[in-house]
Amino acid sequence: MKSLTELNAIRQKIAKVPDYKILVGMATCGIAAGANPVMAQLKKIAQEKNLKNIDIQLTGCIGICRLEPIVEVYDSKGDRYTYVKVDSKKAADIMQKHIIEGNPCTDYLICDDSDSCIKNILETKSFKKQIRIALRNCGNINPEHIDEYIQHDGYLALGKVLTEMQPSEVIKLLLDSGLRGRGGAGFPTGLKWKFAAAAQNEQKYVCCNADEGDPGAFMDRSVLEGDPHSILEAMAIAGYAIGSNQGYIYVRAEYPVAVKRLNLAIKQAKEYGLLGKNIFGTDFSFDIELRLGAGAFVCGEETALMTSIEGKRGEPRPRPPFPANKGLFGKPTILNNVETLANVPVIINKGPEWFSKIGTEKSKGTKVFAVGGKINNTGLIEIPMGMTLREVIYEIGGGIPNGKAFKAAQTGGPSGGCIPAEHLDIQIDYDNLVAIGSMMGSGGLIVMDEDNCMVDIAQFFLGFTVDESCGKCPPCRIGTRRMLEMLEKITDGKGEDKDIEKLERLAYSIKEASLCGLGQTAPNPVLSTLRYFRDEYKAHIYKKACPSGVCKHLLNYYIEAEKCVGCSVCARNCPVNAISGVVKSPYLIDNEACIKCGVCYEKCKFGAIYKK
């Protein structure tokens, strides 16, 4: 690409508009749900029926993961139809009735909360409350075709920066926008770039952190699968701003679809001259390489990530010096996560004022969340900063299944905290979440209902952190293990007086003394549950009871005589013969012999067995 003129020629190229354009959601979520057979069926019928003016393409994650596989049909009039939970049979019906006969299959269209089917996803309550910036192209373009990205203003920001702006002007623009890092504590992106630009060295590096390791998080993966060129463009812009000619994307090897599409995007960008030497005819050159991570959660920490890229064991390094002065291979380096970078081209194209009008005073723009757990609309959302948690859960998320009560939401993954019902109306931004004992993190949001035990939740997240600790510093390596042992003791019904105080004291010590962010934030799930659900800890310790009926060592199973029909299914399935009785008479459970496996509870068809 020698000039902006060539880029604009591709942008303005008017292709022949097909009678129908069909997009099949083929991110990991779609593929896992069965999108490949759907795509094969659509193409097979198009070929058999000799349908010439039909364009069938793959696309990335549309966001409503619970309804995959998804097929969207665009007609020549601009109408859009969103078909959900599509299988091969439905795909055949869509081709016959909608494409050939011209009659949309209304039974397969997306439905809103009222269960009334509507035309497309844009008309749903969930989408109407979202603002898509980082996800702007996901589900709308074929991520494997560079021309489609260019026709959606792709690489326009890079061309503008290289031909019209000085590096200092790019950094000032980002500072004015208020963009903060979307991968953790929210450090100002422009300030990070400014520090690296000021560092004196002939070689500098730009790194993208795509090592998304939080349980339940899939934001970065979805962007890489649905819009990889946006990351390449942003990294090139960052390289120009700080004076770097080399970038690295550190991506999880467990993301094969993302890796494949990133490699293809890099190849296409090089062929178009958008990576490599003398981009847009300037003296600026920039290249990008992938480095695959081996699944170590600690490598999401910036210094551990850089150490891993260098080919060493992924362990964090003390700071200072900070990466902006001494990072990858000892050279000045900036590291941003995928979502942060995805915002950069849009900010340059639309201006910092446009971006800064979205969100709150100290948290500008939007935030992508992967919403999961006890919520009806699981999937990927992008909301303006400042939206309340209540709006996210009940308006976008569709509320809690089965009429259950909301109990807590975990944000920030193993580094975050649990937000209780009393804070449902808190505005979501960096500072508000920290104030109530949680954090934004990369964007996982796991919802819990009345049936969740918060001590068990704390134990789960801490167990994850213990397994993922690199072991370099004793506070994290030993301290988190001791915390986990205390939680296991409490959930096993062996808790003692003063255990809560010991747990808290150890948690604060680990936060103060750990080397990196993994250890410093590891106690957060425990501390937040102690802050808001202390009574549950006390019940486990002093009453030897789990109020939610989750911790099996504190449970007993009983048979309600009035409901028991004497079918003997429970007794026949008990692995330790702890249930006795006579057929057609109520059975009894010997709680001394019972191993709390719950098989009887699951097998009883009459609701006669309950746990307490």
Image: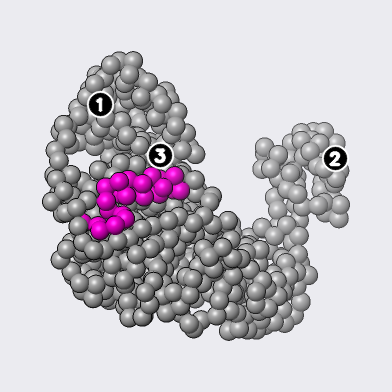
What main secondary structure does the magenta stretch of the protein show?
A: helix
- The image quadrant that residue 178 belongs to is bottom left
Between the residue at mark 3 and the residue at mark 1, the CA separation in whole angstroms equals 18 Å
Instruction: Assess whether mark 1 and mark 3 are in contact (beta carbons under 8 angstroms).
Output: no
- The image quadrant that residue 478 belongs to is bottom right
The residue indicated by pointer 1 is 54
**Which residues are drawn in magenta?**
258-280
Amino acid found under the numbered disc labelled 2 = Gly
Specify few, some or many for label 2: CA neighbours under 10 Å numbering under 14, 14-19, or 20 or more: some
Q: Disc 2 or disc 3, which is closer to the eye?
A: 3
Residue 444 percent coordinates (x, y): 47, 60
Dot 1: element = strand
Q: Does the stretch in magenta take in 270?
A: yes
Amino acid found under the numbered disc labelled 1 = Ile
Q: Earlier in the sequence, mark 3 or mark 1?
A: 3
Residue 535 percent coordinates (x, y): 62, 73
Between the residue at mark 1 and the residue at mark 2, the CA separation in whole angstroms equals 67 Å
The residue indicated by pointer 2 is 581
Residue 116 percent coordinates (x, y): 32, 38
Residue at 30%, 15% (x, y): give it. 49
Position of residue 68 relative to residue 364, above or below, is above
Q: Which dot marks residue 26?
A: 3
Residue at 75%, 49% (x, y): give it. 597
Dot 2: element = loop
Dot 3: element = loop
